[in-house]
């Protein structure tokens, strides 16, 4: 693909996992969207959700692999499905694209391999690297580029980038920011770009963040010599130190909004206002994350 693809304004999809839950997916423990890949009866729901984002205006869709990482599957006694569901996620995304008959790119979602929103990778960094490698290897066939989904430290980016470098595929780097504009590691966006940017980078986005977090860094992003943007979430608040302790914490009816809440103020019109404002600031990569639905994406597609 064209390494300058995101130099032009592009629309990404929204939050697949939360959208599946909103459509009636009954998650098991903390599997959440991964359950829709394990249960073949839910595969059509995944395809339809991808299609709805595409028909709403998304030019890029991300594979439903955020909770298909090995660590989360082990937590739910489902590691045996690891290979099958990561391959299946790519197949379902490709099927949705084919049905749509639109020029849509597929991003292989490669999530953090330990704890979401945390810079703590534990002591076994070799295991983190192995888990990145194993998941990336399953995703690389059929995707247009990798999307590093919600990285929380430079070290996490470094390990992931090292792993995928050998595949010679472009990468969109998605880093998480707290409301103070810093990564959970305390690093700044510019630190990550200066230290880790390589020839494969398509751009950098602020991933699964609040509008407040983006506003904290918006002016500094203009100094980056690289395309940038966001996937905003509509959670009410991500507490510092938030962890998914165990599957028993959530039960069969688990949903992240049980703990994180839902920002009901971030409706379609408000989302449009934020995106329009951030576009004027130079953002060209526009999308949503958790609780951002096809109706939100349809609204911002008017900005193209």
Image (cartoon, grey):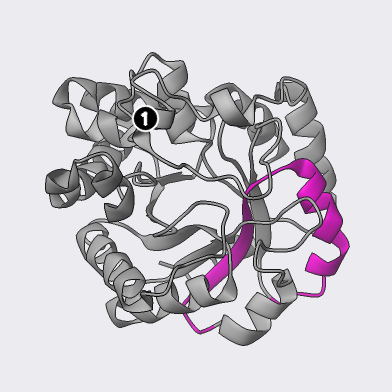
Say if 248 sits above or below 275 in the image: above
Near-viewer residue (290 or 54): 290
Is residue 293 shown left or right of residue 39? right
**Residue at 70% from the left image edge and 72% from the top image edge:** 187
In percent of width and height, residue 207 lies at 60, 52
Q: Which residue is mark 1?
A: 248
Q: Residues within 10 Å of mark 1 (few under 14, many from 20)?
A: some
From which residue to which does the magenta span run? 198-225
**Residue at 72% from the left image edge and 42% from the top image edge:** 210
Q: Secondary structure at mark 1?
A: helix
Residue 172 appears in the rendering: yes
In percent of width and height, residue 200 lies at 46, 78
Pick out the residue farthest to the right: 219
**Residue at 42% from the left image edge and 27% from the top image edge:** 250
Residue 279 appears in the rendering: no
Is residue 259 shown left or right of residue 200? right
301 in magenta: no
Near-viewer residue (48 or 134): 134
Near-viewer residue (57 or 31): 31
**Residue at 56% from the left image edge and 35% from the top image edge:** 290
Q: Quadrant of the N terminus?
A: bottom left
In percent of width and height, residue 66 lies at 39, 46
Which quarter of the figure has residue 21? Answer: top left
Is residue 251 shown left or right of residue 187? left
């Amino acid at each position: 693909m064209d390494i300058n693809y995101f130099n032009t304004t592009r629309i990404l999809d929204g939050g697949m996992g939360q959208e599946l839950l909103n459509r009636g997916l009954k998650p098991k423990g903390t599997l959440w969207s991964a359950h829709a890949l394990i249960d073949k009866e839910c595969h059509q729901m995944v395809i339809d959700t991808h299609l709805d984002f595409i028909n709403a205006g998304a030019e890029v869709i991300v594979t439903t692999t955020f909770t298909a990482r090995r660590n989360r599957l082990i937590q739910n006694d489902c590691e045996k499905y690891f290979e099958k569901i990561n391959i299946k996620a790519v197949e379902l995304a490709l099927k949705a694209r084919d049905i749509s008959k639109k020029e849509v790119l597929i991003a292989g979602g490669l999530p953090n391999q330990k704890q979401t929103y945390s810079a703590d990778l534990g002591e076994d960094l070799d295991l983190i690297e192995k888990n990145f490698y194993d998941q990336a290897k399953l995703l690389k066939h059929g995707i247009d580029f990798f999307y590093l989904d919600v990285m929380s430290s430079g070290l996490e980016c470094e390990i992931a980038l090292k792993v995928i470098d050998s595949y010679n595929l472009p990468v969109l780097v998605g880093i998480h920011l707290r409301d103070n504009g810093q990564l959970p590691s305390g690093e700044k966006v510019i630190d990550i770009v200066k230290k880790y940017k390589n020839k494969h980078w398509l751009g950098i986005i602020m991933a699964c963040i609040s509008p407040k977090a983006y506003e904290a860094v918006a002016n500094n992003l203009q100094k980056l010599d690289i395309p940038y943007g966001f996937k905003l979430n509509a959670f009410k608040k991500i507490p510092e130190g938030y962890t998914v302790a165990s599957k028993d914490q959530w039960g069969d009816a688990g949903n992240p909004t049980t703990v994180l809440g839902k920002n009901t103020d971030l409706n379609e019109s408000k989302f449009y206002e934020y995106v329009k404002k951030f576009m004027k600031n130079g953002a060209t990569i526009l999308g949503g994350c958790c609780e951002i639905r096809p109706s939100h994406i349809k609204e911002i597609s008017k900005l193209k």
